[in-house]
Image (tube, rainbow, N blue to C red):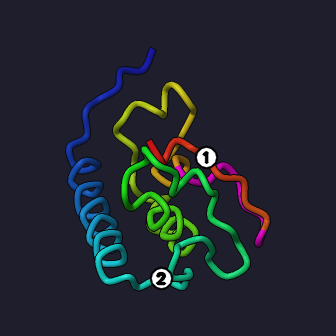
Amino acid sequence: MKERHFRPWKLLLAIPVALLAGIALLTTLSCGNTTSSSQDTAVGNIQIPSWASAPGTPANSAKAYAFALERPDLLSQVPCYCGCGQSAGHKSNLDCFIKSRNGDNVTFDQHGSY
């Protein structure tokens, strides 16, 4: 049986990627630099799910879903640390928002609105 070794360089590479993605997300959310409508109900032809802006969800959930639609390249590089990898099979933070996407046909995951 091959023994697994801790590789600190992998952690060192993940930190800048996570920081860059976080900065991009915060910049997008704070500056309103999205192509979504003023109500954050759509990005292009794709409707943001209504439960993303329902009462009881975090204030910027709809904006986070819009960001996931606009920048899947960034969110797919950010690991999720909430444990959803084990419980829901998520491989990245993008999986918390989008289950699948084929062009404008998107299946959302409600996990990102918790």
Q: Please name whichever residue, 40 or 82, is drawn nearer the observer in this view of the structure.
A: 40
Residue lying at 65% horizontally and 52% vertically, measured from the top left = 108
Q: Disc 2 versus disc 1: distance between alpha carbons?
A: 20 Å
Residue lying at 52% horizontally and 25% vertically, measured from the top left = 87
Q: Please name whichever residue, 80 or 46, is drawn nearer the observer in this view of the structure.
A: 46
Residue where numbered disc 1 is placed: 109
Count of labels shown?
Answer: 2
- Marking on residue 34: 2
Q: Amino acid at mark 1?
A: Asp
| Place of residue 64 in the rendered image (x, y in percent of width and height, measured from the top left) | 45, 63
For the C terminus, the image quarter is top left
| Place of residue 2 in the rendered image (x, y in percent of width and height, measured from the top left) | 42, 20
Q: Earlier in the sequence, mark 2 or mark 1?
A: 2
| Quadrant of residue 45 within the rendered picture | bottom right
Magenta-colored segment: predominant secondary structure: strand
Residue lying at 50% horizontally and 72% vertically, measured from the top left = 71
For the magenta stretch, what is the residue range? 97-104
Q: Is 67 above or below relative to 106? A: below
**Mark 2, secondary structure of its residue:** loop
